[in-house]
Amino acid sequence: MSAKRMRYVDVTTRDGHQSLWATRMTNAMILPIAEQMDRIGFDWINLEGGAVFDVCVRFLHEDPWERMRLVAERVTATPIDIMTRGQSLFTFRFFADDVVELTIRRIRANGMRRITVYDALNDTRNLELSVRVGKEEGLHVAAALVYTLSPVHTDEYYQRIARELVALGADTVMIKDPSGLLLPDRVRTLVPALKAVIGDVPLELHSHSLSGMAEPCYLEAAQLGVDILHTASDPLAGGASLPSTEYCARHLAKEGIESRLDRDGLATMTDYFTGVAHRYGFPLAVPNRFDPDLYRHQVPGGMISNLRVDLKRMNLEDRAEEILAEAEQVRIDLGYPILVSPFAQFVIAQAMLNVLGDERYGTIPDEVAKYVRGHYGRLAGEVDPNVADRVFATGPSEPFGGRAGELIPPALPELRRERGPFDSDDDLLLAAFYSDQELTGLREARRRGAPVYPSATDPLAQLIEGLRSGPAGQSISLERPGLRLSVVR
């Protein structure tokens, strides 16, 4: 029998820095290594999705569509992947069908060859449009079911979701574990259950290392038939990020599960991104210890750190543990929503209002009310009757039972009338996602002209550029047999 080959999705330039570097990786950090990443043997490279697209616009003032094009120019052998949140795409809002359809078509037009789609409620109706248009465009479509722990999220529940994803036409089915809640014991039941219903459709695993358990889960899942693992380069692996590519490839090879990854290329990536971390002051990944509390409140690590910062700003940092405990109860009250964007934010917001307000559920944000009314999709569990009564007392007496996109009228004709004309459909979509004020920084950066990006790593050029842009009086000397170099500024 021939050895099994594990396939890999590299998430370094998407989820790696989103999890560890506050999503602050720029084009200048990605492009020098892109051509070498293309030769390593990854099956896909995950480039954008979720916060990356959003942070490009709001904080980095880089056009996320241009990032796709720039990387596609350099990465020609390895298909590039973009992740979207179904009907909400890259932000927390739900969008009209015409916006969703055009977005998928522009992803393909800008050189991408795969999309990964998921819905935070596992309502597959919210993925129908993305999957259909992706298939029309010739994209490889990976459709994810989002993993969590609750009395209603059983293996049978996930089998039903997997069947629906296959029926939609997904090329692969993915287990997405955003909070790192999987344990090896659950892997031993969940993976065979899913393999039993998806047939020949490959199964992917994407799990964060928040609990410190993702690595043993990956090794276990590989033995049970998972076909594709999502991993990151060592400097951006572990902790709140995903397992290390090098770690998985090394240990699976000992079990007879090979890969086509070039070990020297992986080492080059490690050196390069370690240098980026040192050069720009980013932290290197630190392994997490097992945290039993995570399995109760299930709040992702990035959200916990943001919560603590917000509470410190309000001089309320001593209430953090109380709010996390309340978030656990709010999640139960709301029928066990999965704590992934945007519902993680909704649950935390409600928990803060319950703890800091005069009465639990005395104030219910509009987003939470829309969730209870079914405007975002089908709920996994029953909402607490007292909470439901408060919500339905101020609106329709019955929840909405249709597909979420049906509630939103077409948006593009009005956008063209009110904010056009646009130079491209990419700019039209940016206007659909963001206000003119939110696009100010990006537009100013465009007016300054496009920077020139290197096409390959060149340590000597980086060194000279660092000396050139630094303070006067710097010097560096390098001696090797037959070479003596001295540079003084």
Image (spheres, rainbow, N blue to C red):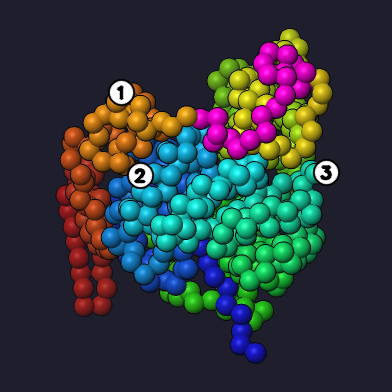
Tell me the kind of residue under disc 3. Answer: Pro
Instruction: Determine which residue is flagged by label 2.
Output: 64
What's the CA distance linking mark 1 and mark 2? 23 Å
- Find residue 287 and report its horizontal and vertical position in percent: 62, 53
The quarter of the picture where residue 189 lies is: bottom right
The quarter of the picture where residue 293 lies is: top right
The label nearer to you, 1 versus 2, is 1
Highlighted range, magenta? 387-408
Q: Could you say which disc has been placed on residue 418 in the image?
A: 1
- The answer to whether residue 432 is above or below residue 463 is above
Question: Do labels 1 and 2 touch, CB within 8 Å?
Answer: no
Question: Do labels 1 and 3 touch, CB within 8 Å?
Answer: no
Q: Is residue 487 left or right of residue 147?
A: left
Tell me the kind of residue under disc 1. Answer: Glu
Nearest the viewer among 474 and 70 is 70
Q: Check disc 1: other Cα within 10 Å, few if <14, some if 14-19, many if 20+.
A: few
- Find residue 228 and report its horizontal and vertical position in percent: 58, 66
Q: Check disc 3: other Cα within 10 Å, few if <14, some if 14-19, many if 20+.
A: few
Nearest the viewer among 200 and 347 is 200
- Find residue 4 and report its horizontal and vertical position in percent: 61, 80
Tell me which residue sits at (64%, 51%) in the image.
145
Is residue 321 one of those drawn in magenta? no
What's the CA distance linking mark 1 and mark 3? 48 Å
Q: Secondary structure at mark 2?
A: helix
Question: Do labels 3 and 2 touch, CB within 8 Å?
Answer: no
The reply to whether residue 174 is visible in this rendering is: no
Q: Secondary structure at mark 3?
A: loop
Question: Where does the N terminus fall, quadrant-wise?
Answer: bottom right
Tell me which residue sits at (67%, 69%) in the image.
199
Instruction: Determine which residue is flagged by label 3.
Output: 151
The label nearer to you, 1 versus 3, is 1
